[in-house]
Image: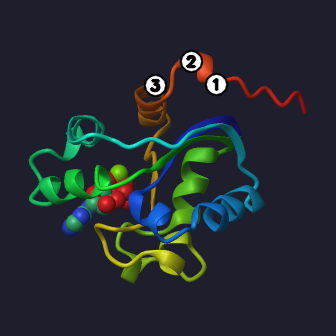
């Protein structure tokens, strides 16, 4: 299996609930390496640009409000099969449908406020990583 990178975002509800450490620990325990990580606050414009693909959906306004409502933590993760494995770790979009033990099942309150983002394809992961990080931020070459 190929080593891939994926973009995670610990969303504002994750930060608000003081769960950055717990969720990051669960991600690392699942074998993901943190390549880059920072805290930022998205504006409505940057949140809207990130979720551009959803702009015709009825929940778009609510999503942009939520994602710009407080700080979030974008993270670049690396692992074999990272994209699919991370989606599995976080669980279904709606926590009510998420498998037991997944991040969203454990911590999310609703389909909108669902703790964490994960890229849905290798191609989108590259676009999303470039949206949140400069290539000079991707400095972590673990060398092992
Ligand atoms: P995922 O984050 O699992 O890839 P989507 O790409 O479908 O899910 O949606 C992006 C984000 O939009 C979701 O994580 C969630 O925050 C929000 N969202 C999706 N569906 C709904 C909905 N029906 N109502 C409110 N917010 C939603
Ligand atoms: Mg998605």
Q: Which residue is mark 2?
A: 135
Q: Which residue is mark 1?
A: 138
Up the image or down, 64 lies above or below 104; here it is above
- The local secondary structure at tag 1 comes to loop
Instruction: Assess whether mark 2 and mark 1 are in contact (beta carbons under 8 angstroms).
Output: yes
- Kind of element beneath mark 2: helix
Q: Is the CB–ligand 2 distance for label 1 below 8 Å? A: no
- Kindly indicate the quadrant of the structure image that contains residue 143: top right
Q: Which residue has dot 3 on it?
A: 130
User: In which image quadrant can residue 119 be found?
Assistant: top left
User: Where is residue 135 shown, x and y percent of the image?
Assistant: 56, 18
Query: What kind of colouring is applied to the model shown?
Result: rainbow
Question: Residue shown at 61%/64% (left/top)?
Answer: 23
Say whether disc 2 or disc 3 marks the residue closer to the N-terminus.
Answer: 3
Mark drawn on residue 13 = none
Figure quadrant of the C terminus:
top right
Q: Are marks 2 and 3 in contact (CB under 8 Å)?
A: yes
């Amino acid at each position: 299996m190929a080593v891939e990178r994926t973009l995670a975002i610990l969303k504002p509800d994750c930060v608000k609930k003081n769960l950055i450490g717990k969720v990051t620990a669960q991600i690392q325990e699942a074998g993901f390496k943190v390549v880059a990580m920072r805290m930022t606050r998205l504006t409505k414009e940057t949140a809207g640009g990130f979720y551009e693909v959803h702009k015709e959906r009825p929940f778009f306004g609510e999503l942009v409000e939520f994602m710009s409502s407080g700080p979030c933590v974008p993270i670049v993760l690396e692992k074999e099969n990272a994209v699919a494995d991370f989606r599995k770790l976080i669980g279904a979009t709606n926590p009510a449908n998420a498998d037991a033990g997944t991040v969203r099942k454990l911590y999310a309150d609703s389909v909108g406020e669902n703790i964490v983002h994960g890229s849905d394809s290798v191609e989108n992961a590259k676009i999303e990583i470039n949206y949140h990080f400069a290539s000079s931020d991707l400095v972590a070459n673990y060398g092992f």
